């Protein structure tokens, strides 16, 4: 009721991206990598896909549905990563990965379309659809960013793509007739600082620093914690009810992701042996 979904997405990723840029600069310098115009254009495209499209749709999805369902559905993005890896990178889908994909997608259906039945509101189904599309787009972003991240580093990719992607929202805000900063800052400045500086800035920097110090598979385990924590926070802070269907869907999504990760680990071992 204070800020639009488009404004919130712009602000959190604009300031979050700016927070990451100094870290990205030192990371890039340490790697001894020089960015080309092509690299910047690719990060602009990735920022548009992630921030302008995926994150904006997610924000509208949260607005129409609720935080618990949003967290569960969006946490399924590793499943869509596996699908796009097969389609774009031509990675083989083994029977184990196929089982994981089916279980996870089943969880998305149960949590999203059956679990949303207890939520009041006229546009809950629309919210669920927007969140699923957002997760699909984020999966595509993850796969397409792999080559660029390998060259410039995940930190640089994230900082630059966040900043450029947020700027792509300015025409949409102008079309909506909304000023990027035209809202009551006094009412929600704490939330704005937390979402932009701490979540889109410090949390992402911490995540990538953690990934550099540990195994990637272990790092991806954070996806298992996100929907559980979000549902607990939503119940405590927003008094959202966690229904049986949502809980069951959450479990299926998590099982699906575990199976897909096991399939990836199995495939990596076979490749290493060859």
Image (tube, rainbow, N blue to C red):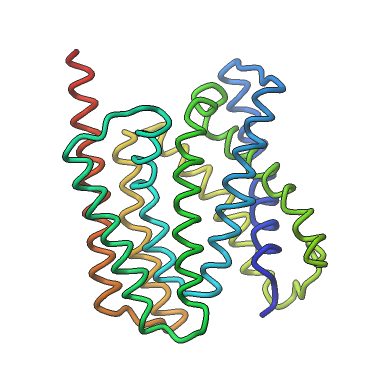
Residue at horizontal 30 percent and vertical 56 percent from the top? 105
Residue furthest front in the image = 87
Residue 161 higher or lower than 36, as above or below: below
Residue 242 x/y as whole percent: 32, 78
Position of the C terminus, as image quadrant, is top left
In the picture provided, is 270 more to the left or to the right than 164?
Answer: left
In the picture provided, is 61 more to the left or to the right than 102?
Answer: right
Residue at horizontal 45 percent and vertical 53 percent from the top? 135
Quadrant hosting residue 235: bottom left
Quadrant hosting residue 33: top right
In the picture provided, is 200 more to the left or to the right than 238?
Answer: right
Residue 165 higher or lower than 7, as above or below: above
Quadrant hosting residue 74: bottom left
Residue 96 x/y as whole percent: 17, 40
Q: How many marks?
A: 0
Residue at horizontal 41 percent and vertical 81 percent from the top? 240
Residue 217 x/y as whole percent: 30, 38
Residue 269 x/y as whole percent: 19, 24
Q: Out of 101 and 192, give the one closest to the viewer.
A: 101
Residue furthest bottom in the image = 120
Residue at horizontal 44 percent and vertical 66 percent from the top? 70
Position of the N terminus, as image quadrant, is bottom right
């Amino acid at each position: 009721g204070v800020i639009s979904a488009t404004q919130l997405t712009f602000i959190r990723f604009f300031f979050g991206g700016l927070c990451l840029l100094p870290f990205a600069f030192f990371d890039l310098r340490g790697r001894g990598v020089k960015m080309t115009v092509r690299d910047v254009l690719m990060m602009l495209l990735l920022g548009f896909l992630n921030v302008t499209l995926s994150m904006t749709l997610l924000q509208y999805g949260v607005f129409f549905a609720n935080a618990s369902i949003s967290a569960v559905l969006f946490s399924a993005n590793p499943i869509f990563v596996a699908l796009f890896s097969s389609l774009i990178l031509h990675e083989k889908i083994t029977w184990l990965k196929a089982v994981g994909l089916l279980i996870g997608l089943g969880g998305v259906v149960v949590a999203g379309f059956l679990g949303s039945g207890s939520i009041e509101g006229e546009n809950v189904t629309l919210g669920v659809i927007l969140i699923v599309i957002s997760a699909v787009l984020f999966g595509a972003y993850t796969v397409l960013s792999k080559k660029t991240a390998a060259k410039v580093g995940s930190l640089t990719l994230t900082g630059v793509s966040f900043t450029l992607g947020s700027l792509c929202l300015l025409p949409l805000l102008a079309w909506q007739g909304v000023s990027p900063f035209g809202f009551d800052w006094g009412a929600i400045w704490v939330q704005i600082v937390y979402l932009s500086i701490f979540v889109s800035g410090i949390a992402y920097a911490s995540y990538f620093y953690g990934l550099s110090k540990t195994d990637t598979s272990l790092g991806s385990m954070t996806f298992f914690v996100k929907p559980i924590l979000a549902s607990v926070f939503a119940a405590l802070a927003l008094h959202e009810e966690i229904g049986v269907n949502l809980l069951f869907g959450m479990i299926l999504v998590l099982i699906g992701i575990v199976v897909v990760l096991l399939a990836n680990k199995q495939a990596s071992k076979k490749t290493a042996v060859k």
